[in-house]
Image: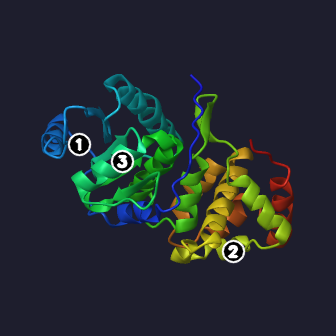
Amino acid sequence: MKKTIYCAFLLAVAAFSVSFRSYPSLSSRFTDDDYKRHINTLKKKIPDANFTIVIQKPFVVIGNEKPDIVRKRAEETVKWSVEKLKAEYFDKDPVRIIDIWLFKNDRDYKKFAKEIFGDNPTSPYGYVNSSHYSLIMNIATGGGTLVHEIVHPFIGSNFPNCPAWFNEGLASLYEQSSEKNGRIVGLTNWRLPGLQQKIRAGKLPTFEALCKSGMKFYGEGSSYSDNYAQARYICYYLQEKSLLKNFYRQFVANSKKDPTGYQTLRNIIGNPDMKKFQSDWQNWILTLTFP
């Protein structure tokens, strides 16, 4: 069944992807007893009887909407995206059992973030508490942010040295996603108009500069959002040219020789003159529309 996931994306989530890179090398295969013990511990954090717990391996979903809605989100968003992402890219599960807390509205999101975790959220959408291995969300803002964040722990276990631009570019691709011929596909999204504006203003960095930006990718102000948009739409281009899955595989295989992915990107698109290629890519981006 085709599913389209819309979102209001959480901008302040860089720490989520980074936190999964530093996990100790634990087994990614958990038994039913592991989950039982995990849930017994988890129950001590739950403040009232209005919460529903759903095991959706390799995650545990906890929500305070009606039980059938929590189960539906676990099935139709978490399970669906995990299955599709694993089929496309990932061989290994995350190295931790990760909790996904879904609060039904902004009031409960702020209230329980404080009560359960001692946090005062600075984002209206969600954030990560890495010490509790938890994604904490105001699910009323939509499911796209959740799909984005599900990508990061899989990157952490399958491509631990992944540079920021591709980690966030691939995750951002699925902020707005659907299913086509049984495969997950990213759609154009709200990042497009801003990217097109930067293209028209001639203010985008070169692909080489973006790929080699390292942790400077997580810049401040407009550059932060611009980097996400450019990285997302590089991935979108590769997807639309049926090159993305192969690029990922080659990037992982060649990451010691090409840690930034720039040479692998050049190779996958046929080693063109990159200045001309970026010009052609930018012209292609200007033909896209959203919504």
Residue 200 lies, in percent from the top left, at: 85, 66
The structure residue drawn at horizontal position 55% and vertical position 77%, both measured from the top left corner, is 216
- Of the residues shown, which amino acid type is indicated by label 1? Phe
Label at residue 30: 1
Element type at mark 2: helix
Label at residue 284: none
- Asked if 130 appears above or below 84 in the picture, the reply is below
Residue 262 lies, in percent from the top left, at: 65, 70
Name which of mark 2 and mark 3 comes first in the sequence: 3
Element type at mark 1: loop
Name which of mark 1 and mark 3 comes first in the sequence: 1
Quadrant including the N terminus: top right
Residue 28 lies, in percent from the top left, at: 29, 49
Q: In front: 211, or 108? A: 108
Indicate left or right for 288 with 163 as reference.
right
Quadrant including the C terminus: top right
Q: Are marks 1 and 3 in contact (CB under 8 Å)?
A: no
Residue beneath label 3, please? 109
- Asked if 220 appears above or below 192 in the picture, the reply is below
Colour scheme = rainbow
The structure residue drawn at horizontal position 81% and vertical position 59%, both measured from the top left corner, is 281
Indicate left or right for 168 with 129 as reference.
right
